[in-house]
Image (cartoon, coloured by chain):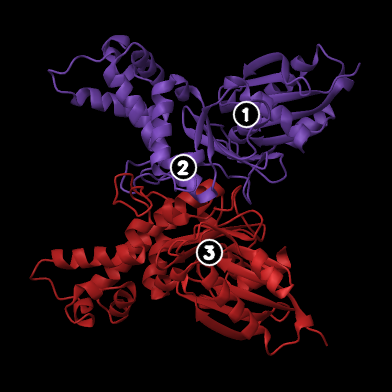
Chain colours: A purple, B red
Amino acid sequence: MKRNLTIGIDVGATTIKGGVVDIVESKILSQQKVDTFALRGPSAVLQQLNLIIKELMLEYRYDEFTGIGIGAPGIVDNDNSTVKNPPNFTDWTEVNLGEVIKKEFNLPVVVENDANAAALGEAKFGAGIDYQNFLFIIWGTGVGGGIILDNKIYRGPFGGAGEIGHTTIDYNGPLCNCGNRGCIESYIGQRYLSERTRQKLEQLPKEAPQSKIIQLVKGNLGLIEPYIISVAAEQGDPFAKEILSEAGNLLGVAIASILNVLDLRIVVVGGGISAAGEYVFNAITKSVRSRVLTSIKPDVKVIPAKLGNTAGIFGAASLVINK
Amino acid sequence: MKRNLTIGIDVGATTIKGGVVDIVESKILSQQKVDTFALRGPSAVLQQLNLIIKELMLEYRYDEFTGIGIGAPGIVDNDNSTVKNPPNFTDWTEVNLGEVIKKEFNLPVVVENDANAAALGEAKFGAGIDYQNFLFIIWGTGVGGGIILDNKIYRGPFGGAGEIGHTTIDYNGPLCNCGNRGCIESYIGQRYLSERTRQKLEQLPKEAPQSKIIQLVKGNLGLIEPYIISVAAEQGDPFAKEILSEAGNLLGVAIASILNVLDLRIVVVGGGISAAGEYVFNAITKSVRSRVLTSIKPDVKVIPAKLGNTAGIFGAASLVINK
């Protein structure tokens, strides 16, 4: 019997991950990864893309493939093919990535922004499967996201929608790398959160009990990263728990604003830092619930993402079906 | 020749305004208004609605009417007929207003939230006529709005979308009447802005030149309202100008967050306070432009609404055509 197989590709700044997805069975049959070589320019990246797709196709019959879906950083044009200004990619202003891959493999190719693809993955196969409308947040290096309306990605008129991380929570807040002040990302993005934690540790009064974070980084506060904070929290460290709940609380501020404007009630949160678990989720939920409008409050749900690293692959694969 | 006439009704908490609109000619042919009697309960309001519609229809042939559109405060259900919890309306939890009016007049009736209707009015006949996608803001008693996507109102899954006023600009900010802190409405809604102005006047050092606002209210600072501030600003009062540009600046913070999330570039601002003109608009534009993402910045436009008081009538009338 001929299966319907789709290739889902998740292009990151350091690694390209890909999988062969059986959409009907909701399963990734096999996975590969290769280096991105983002700093070597677009043609190096395209070579790596070709490489991973070829490797993925090797074990299957060509006529079982219905298409290739690609999630990539940056803004993806309304042609669902051209990728513009992906951050941390050298010499990449605008590349019609979809066209190149389509020519190479003679299959339909659909390209989408990586966070949007992950949102779609959670919508079709993950935490959002029961919800037609939700806000997806991916909280790791930065704070990104996607908006799912009627089971589809809301791309906005120019394909750049879902920039949850640049929602202001304090107009006098810290400077963000986007140039604005007080964006939620400038409080809880990986680098910012680590730096805030370092500063707060240094400001602790000497008589305060030493945080486990300091032991975990062996006194080198420059090594603090969110993963360390969450390990310390799991070991019961009150300072680390406090840092994570403050971060969750702040994320809740941004989420509430967005739910109010869009009249959404469901939030799916994924990404590395959200894996810190209950401290974070309880804080987000409490903050969102205390801040949203009365009409929204009773139905608000903050749900952990389900697919982890594979959300991008699943989402990219389902782009082909959705198109 | 038989014209296509539509009735557009704008239900406010104190006055119901209505007009007979010739959609093809983009013209209001005649207008009426009646008291709302919102405090006397739904049946009193419905009587007034019947009254104004009958008055409007009097001068025309019944067979020229294609339908009745109604903009009302509160959340309008996805049936485009039921109005839920309009603020300042007594004993009104849920009323299927559309059904009652439809029975009475035997014409198609479409009901929509008032701010959404005004947004649609500006989209079809006003400042938004050249734009398929924009954010509409109505800045008066409160800060409300609507989101126009692909020339249509974005209602959200439950009809409550567009609550621009409850976008947080400072998570530690002043308490808002919605229960949240630091909503933009809690800085620049009519009552809040008047109160902020009063407080700032009282805090002015004695040697500072006296603001024209004080003369205009004859020393009674309880009488300050946005209209007074804008009159003072027009007379060159630096304090009043400063108040208005600060308000515009703050509104720009909320707008920038929303443009980033939705990838919109056009903002149409209407409502009583926005009539204060250039001080306000220059400040909003500057603030938005300095805060939005690089991808949005070059195309950002903040445009004054065009239809003033009639946006609601035009928008309500065009609901019928759009349905």
Give the label, 1 or 2, closer to the camera: 2
SS under mark 2: helix
In which quadrant of the rendered image does the N terminus of chain A lie? Answer: top right
- Decide if residue B188 is on the left or right side of residue B154: left
The chain holding disc 3 is: B
Q: Where does label 3 land, which residue?
A: B115
Q: CA distance from mark 1 to mark 2?
A: 23 Å
Q: To which residue does mark 1 refer? A: A122
Q: Looking at numbered disc 3 in the image, what kind of residue is underneath it?
A: Ala
Residue beneath label 2, please? Answer: A297
Asked if one can make out residue B294 in the rendered structure from this viewpoint, the answer is: no
**Residue B229 placement, left or right of B268:** left
Q: Identify whether A265 is placed above or below A240.
A: below
Q: State how far apart marks 1 and 3 are (Cα).
A: 33 Å
Q: Quadrant of residue B219?
A: bottom left
Instruction: Tell me if I can see residue A305 in this picture.
Output: yes
User: Do the residues at pointers 1 and 2 share their chain?
Assistant: yes
